[in-house]
Image: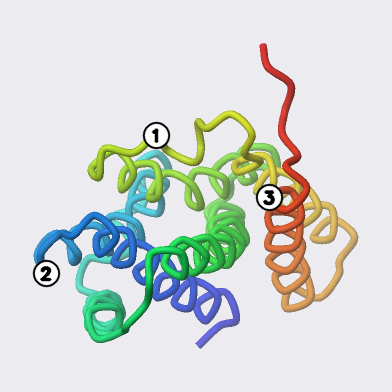
């Protein structure tokens, strides 16, 4: 298994946990939890694959994918957490997820002949659109669109750093790890310091 596969599967599980936690915070049933977990984990990657013409999309015929989503739903349903802990856990798992999906999405795009600029864009879509769809389904204002949140921006920063390291011929493993850590770090710091883009 390639390092990018490990990154993507880990990100899938983390995002599935995020979706299931969101469902639990809205008091959804097990079907609702499974739906949000799946959409959060695979929504962005599915949109990326459709745009790039990758057939079949990444989760078709992938039993590992469904197992990761099912495991996340079971774990979250058995966990005992208060509302505040839920919000903190969702934030941390989401930060890790967007880091992993940005790196993985860029790498998949590069492997399919997409240039650096659009590979970064595909990485941002991979990382953010699953959460966007899950937020819409749960009637929340998506993090992607909230004032006072650096969300897609941190994916963009990490993605640019990633492709620059690729052009500098840095080891792929190091590229991926640095990209993920950078995105997670910036996301957490921007939240703690309340950093945001200026209003239009």
Looking at the figure, which quarter contains the C terminus?
top right
Q: Secondary structure at mark 3?
A: helix
The residue positioned 73% from the left and 53% from the top of the image is 192
Residue 43 image position (x, y, % from top left): 33, 51
Residue 57 image position (x, y, % from top left): 29, 57
- Badge 1 or badge 3: first in the primary sequence: 1
Reply above or below: 196 against 86. Answer: above
- Left or right: residue 48 versus residue 65 is right
In the orientation shown, which residue stands out farthest toward the top? 200
- Left or right: residue 107 versus residue 84 is right
The residue positioned 20% from the left and 73% from the top of the image is 61
Of residue 108 and residue 44, the one placed in the foreground of this image is 44
Q: For mark 2, what is the residue? A: 30
Image quadrant in which you'd find residue 51? top left
- Residue 88 circle label: none
At label 2, counting other C-alpha atoms closer than 10 Å, the crowd grade (few under 14, some 14-19, many 20 or more) is some
Image quadrant in which you'd find residue 189? bottom right
Of residue 95 and residue 178, the one placed in the foreground of this image is 95
- Badge 2 or badge 1: first in the primary sequence: 2
Find the distance from the CA under tag 1 to the CA under tag 3. Answer: 17 Å
Reply above or below: 74 against 21. Answer: below
- Left or right: residue 5 versus residue 41 is right
Q: For mark 3, what is the residue? A: 191
Q: For mark 1, what is the residue? A: 141
Find the distance from the CA under tag 2 to the CA under tag 3. Answer: 30 Å
The residue positioned 29% from the left and 66% from the top of the image is 20
């Amino acid at each position: 298994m390639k390092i990018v596969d490990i990154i993507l599967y880990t990100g899938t599980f983390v995002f599935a946990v995020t979706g299931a936690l969101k469902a639990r915070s809205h008091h959804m049933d097990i079907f609702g939890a499974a739906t949000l977990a799946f959409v959060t984990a695979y929504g962005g990657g599915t949109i990326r694959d459709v745009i790039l013409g990758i057939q079949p999309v990444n989760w078709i015929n992938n039993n590992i994918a469904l197992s990761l989503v099912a495991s996340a739903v079971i774990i979250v349903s058995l966990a005992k957490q208060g509302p505040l802990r839920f919000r903190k856990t969702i934030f941390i798992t989401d930060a890790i997820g967007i880091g992993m999906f940005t790196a993985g999405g860029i790498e998949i795009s590069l492997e399919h002949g997409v240039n650096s600029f659009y590979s970064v864009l595909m990485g941002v879509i991979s990382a953010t659109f699953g959460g966007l769809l899950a937020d819409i389904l749960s009637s929340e204002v998506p993090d992607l669109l909230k004032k006072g949140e650096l969300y897609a921006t941190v994916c963009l920063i990490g993605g640019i750093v990633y492709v620059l390291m690729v052009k500098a011929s840095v080891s792929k493993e190091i590229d991926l790890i640095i990209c993920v850590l950078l995105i997670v770090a910036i996301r957490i710091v921007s939240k703690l310091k309340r950093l945001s883009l200026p209003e239009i």
